């Protein structure tokens, strides 16, 4: 019998890639999404279904995780083997614009989602973030056991609070199955694109403007292609057991100037220094815990990701700019324009 996966935030950047691959594998998938970023859900659903195999299926419910009654009704009806909880606001800029709303969605509602999964005894995959490691002064690979700095933004603040809540939940109920990922910055192509993520943003600027503006060029970021991340989820689902609660997952630890140099190989552009940036992250992560336990080997080079991104930007540039980047930003267009 094929596995059944329920995904909150299922029409998002990560959820839609996972759903497409799951349907291709013959899984039954149910997507639950509020369309907070005004995605073109018909186009995304068509893309997800484009690789459908025998037995694979996907259904969509438009709903908000804060509507716990609707969520519970749909989870009970679907009876999934796993719930992938991605239904949170995912952007430092978006979370900083409205902190009370962020607390409501990313903490208060997420706690209720986790409570529901515990009550119904459904295993959970929850995405935290490697951004929790913040601005590291000493350059070394950060592990899951390293102490975390005080959060500098509301996105990280509520990710830390959710990790604390989940730890308490697992301590109270040893039978509750949940795994927490701290993913690298994700890049690459998705049925529902995000253009403002660092590698995607850099590639867009290089292709469309011929200029790549960089602050703190020697700051590092952990980076991973979205297809590799999704393969990591499947590694967990197919194995079905895990030893720890929290795992880093990523592939490359690259400085911003290394990312820019790779982009210059596929898009002729000038690299221009910027004197100021609101993004102070500087981190590298150690992913050996997950890689060894799940015999996992990310396979997509950052050069390959950038080549694919550059091709996508060239193909979609006119449409993106004509529609004012509708549906492909996890921030306002005003915030995005300030980054260009």
Image: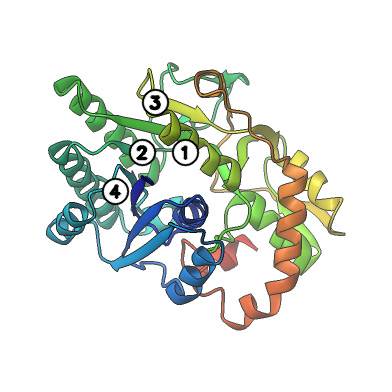
Residue 35, given in percent of the width and then of the height, sits at 36, 68
State which tag comes first along the sequence, 1 or 2: 2
Mark 3 to mark 2: distance in Å? 10 Å
Name the residue tied to disc 2.
125
Name the residue tied to disc 3.
246
The residue positioned 70% from the left and 58% from the top of the image is 309
Mark 1 falls on what kind of element? helix
Question: Looking at this rendering, what residue extends furthest in the bottom direction?
Answer: 322
In the displayed structure, 288 sits above or below 36; it is above
Q: Nearer the viewer, mark 3 or mark 2?
A: 2
Mark 3 to mark 4: distance in Å? 18 Å
Name the residue tied to disc 1.
233
Q: Viewer-proximal residue, 287 or 116?
A: 116
Give the image quarter of residue 241: top left
Tally of marks: 4
From the viewer's perspective, tell me whether residue 161 is left or right of residue 241: left
Q: Which mark is residue 106?
A: 4
């Amino acid at each position: 019998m094929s596995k059944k996966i329920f995904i909150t935030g299922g029409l998002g950047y990560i959820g839609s890639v996972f759903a497409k691959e799951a349907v291709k594998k013959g899984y039954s998938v149910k997507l639950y999404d509020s369309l907070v970023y005004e995605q073109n859900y018909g186009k995304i659903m068509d893309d997800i279904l484009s690789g459908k195999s025998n037995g694979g299926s996907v259904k969509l419910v438009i709903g908000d995780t804060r509507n716990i009654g609707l969520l519970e009704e749909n989870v009970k009806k679907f009876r999934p083997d796993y719930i992938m909880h991605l239904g949170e606001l995912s952007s430092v800029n978006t979370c900083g614009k409205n902190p009370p709303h962020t607390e409501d969605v990313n903490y208060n509602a997420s706690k209720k989602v986790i409570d529901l999964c515990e009550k119904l005894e459904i295993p959970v995959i929850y995405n935290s973030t490697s951004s929790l490691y913040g601005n590291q002064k000493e350059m070394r690979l950060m592990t899951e056991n390293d102490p975390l700095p005080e959060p500098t933004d509301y996105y990280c603040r509520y990710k830390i609070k959710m990790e604390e809540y989940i730890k308490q939940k697992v301590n109270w109920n040893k039978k509750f199955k949940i795994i927490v990922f701290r993913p690298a910055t994700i890049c690459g192509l998705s049925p529902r694109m995000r253009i403002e993520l660092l590698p995607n943003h850099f590639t867009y600027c290089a292709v469309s403007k011929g200029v790549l503006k960089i602050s703190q060029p020697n700051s590092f970021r952990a980076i991973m292609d979205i297809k590799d991340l999704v393969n990591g989820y499947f590694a967990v689902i197919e194995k079905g057991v895990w030893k720890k609660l929290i795992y880093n997952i990523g592939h490359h630890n690259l400085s911003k100037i290394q990312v820019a140099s790779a982009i210059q190989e596929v898009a002729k552009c000038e690299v221009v220094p910027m004197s100021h940036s609101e993004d102070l992250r500087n981190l590298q992560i150690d992913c050996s815990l997950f890689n060894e336990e799940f015999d996992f080997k990310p396979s997509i080079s950052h050069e390959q990701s950038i080549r694919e991104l550059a091709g996508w930007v060239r193909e979609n540039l006119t449409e993106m700019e004509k529609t004012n980047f509708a549906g492909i930003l996890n921030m306002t267009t005003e915030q995005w324009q300030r980054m260009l």
